[in-house]
Amino acid sequence: MTPPALLVAAALGLTACGGDNPGEAAEAGEVNTNESIESLEDVNEAPTLTELVSAGELPELAERLPVAEDIMVEPVLEQIGEHGGTWNMPWNGIDSPWGIGKITEEALFRFAADGDGVEPNVAKGYEVNDDYTEFTIFLREGMKWSDGEPFTARDVIFWWEHVMKPEIFQRGVYDAFYSTDPETGERAQAVIEQVDDHTFTVSFEHPRVLFLERLAIDAKWMFAPAHYLENILDEFVGEEEAMRIASEHGFADLEGWYEHITYYFWIWPDRPSLRAWVATEEPRSNNVTWERNPYYWKTDAEGNQLPYIDQVVLESVQDDSHVLLETMSGHFDISQFGFGNFTELAENQEQGDYRILQWEGVNWASDSLMLNQTVQDDQLRELFQDARFREALSVAVDREELSEILTLGLGAPQQASINQALPFHQEGWAEQWAEYDVERAGELLDELGLEYDGDYRTLPDGSELRLEILQESDDAQAGDFEELLQHYFEAVGIRTDVRLVDRGTLDQTLLDNEHVATTAFGPGGISPYLRPDTVVPVRDIAAGNTWFGEFGCMYEQVCEPSGDYEVPEAIEQMWDLWAEVSSATDTEAIEDAAEQIVKLHQDNQWVLGYTGPVPMLIAVSNDIVNVPDGVTFADEFRDLGHGRPAQFSFVGLED
């Protein structure tokens, strides 16, 4: 495992360049072809697929895979696995698709297992010109969708022209596809063109050194099955027919349907996929079975077609306590938990026949609060944008007590800040506004003109000051942290409400800028330039929309301010610095601008942290091998998906 402090240095510049002069190695690029499979006769399929071939229900293996040299061979993790078995995992339903989504994701380019930059995945390779303005990307010849139709560059162009640019899944064109003029700071959208069936180009007006890294995060799946969507989208079939199809799938409008079939697409059984497993049932079922994809294009080092596991069964769960109980009983094979469940999991390991792995997170805090800097109420917005109010909410909380209650004392009582093991760590940041001081909190609130009658405070105009904290109801320990904050805040006179909602409602509330404050999500990531959207307001998405509100969609120029307010100078400075990152042509300039972005966060403390990061716990059945330990758990690495689940394998199946 590459130490976290080395991950950024590896990701920056080693993908397609050799150091401070990106052009030195730019012409070569990288093409990933295997040398261990000389012929398709060297590939072995799962017994369940052999049975289907024999029954005439499936084409021969040679007709389902790419040409031999374009098959992707995964390196051995612990051992060569065995075909077979059923992976039982918890499922929060159609409104929480990311659990199975990240596990099964197949990106065009992905982060390497050791964090050493990005590598081709769905793509076979790439070349880039000397000034990083044109990327030529190669696909795998003979690769097929899960329904057996060819996967070609046409599917990339279709996604770009008919899904991404029209923004039919309610997301703006990703930052990855813009380059920035180093002189003016203006952004220009890329041009994507097909060269042949297995080649396309992405061209920029200005250098885009970090394009592949941004692509691996922003637009992991920049492809869509044209042959399928041409029979779905109203652009091709007309609005009446498109609505009929949407209704059949339970949607009352095209907007919601398109978001699912083009963004959350992996949970729909009739939508072709490139993933290791594909859904066989509608996601609204309580228990949904996913079967191995017979057209999956990867093998292990001995030529065994992946995935090893035959099927994944997603079982509907009511809440996290259900997941915990079923894991401790040995029913769920692999489950993820926050560190607050460590004691119970450890005490039941032998009974449940599982082991506990600890994956290191990269968040700035394990428990944090974000005030919406563009909240629609004018008085609250002015208050939230005043650092004195944020400091008051910070020092009003006893972090020592909170840490013991929520993290067994393992989450350090500190401010939201970058861990000392990661790049861009700032000395003294963790201690900023972190000392429990109720008297100081009161003084700051008095300075702000928030009158206190002994019970609650009022806003300067005499109206009620009320803080509503929004959180996802399915989140581990949902309500526990929020109710503690409510206790501390009301002790200094701030009336506080806690509102728990489902994930769909949470996302929509954040996207609509209707939240006041939230404990959902928060900044983090390996570096501010690998995952800027929670650190810099550059995207209008829920996960990054927790503290900066409308600033993200304003940056993307897809919305106007909902009130009469000016963008704070610090936000403008961050946008300028992000423009420097986006247009820089050497690593030193990128790192310098990123450092300044981090220092703006330290100076302003938009995110209030109360406990330091704690590991993510992965409970794994002792019957399963090839699940790594000590891996970095980060969204840009796709969480558990970074462990290469297609290689997870049951052992002793013959018994």
Image (cartoon, grey):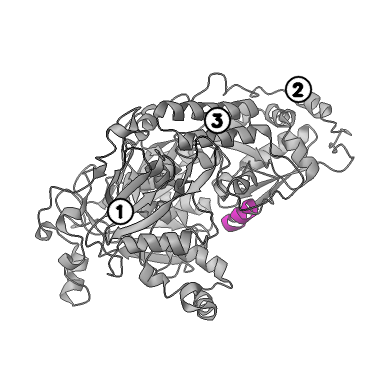
Q: Distance between the residues labelled 2 and 3?
A: 28 Å
Pointer 3: residues within 10 angstroms few (<14), some, or many (20+)?
many
Mark 2 or 1: the one toward you: 1
Identify the image quadrant of residue 573. top right
Where does the image place residue 596, in percent across and percent down from the top left?
54, 26
Task: Residue 347: tell me if it is visible.
Answer: no
Q: What stretch is highlighted in magenta?
A: 503-511
| Residue 222 x %, y % | 40, 55
Counting residues from the N terminus, which is met first, the one under dot 2 or under dot 1? 1
Residue 322 at x, y percent in the picture:
50, 54
In the foreground, 460 or 34: 34
Residue lying farthest to the top in this orientation: 427
Name the residue beneath numbered marker 3: 597
Quadrant holding the C terminus: bottom left
Mark 2: few, some, or many residues within 10 Å (few <14, many ≥20)?
A: some
Q: Which amino acid does label 2 sit on?
A: Arg
| Disc 2 versus disc 3: nearer the observer | 3
Q: Residue at x 78, y 37 (%)?
A: 494
- The residue at which mark 1 appears reads as 122
Q: Is residue 326 visible?
A: yes
Left or right of 451? Residue 405 is: left
Q: Name the residue under label 2.
A: 440
Mark-to-mark CA distance, 1 and 3: 33 Å
- Image quarter (top left, top right, bottom left or bottom right) of the N terminus: top left
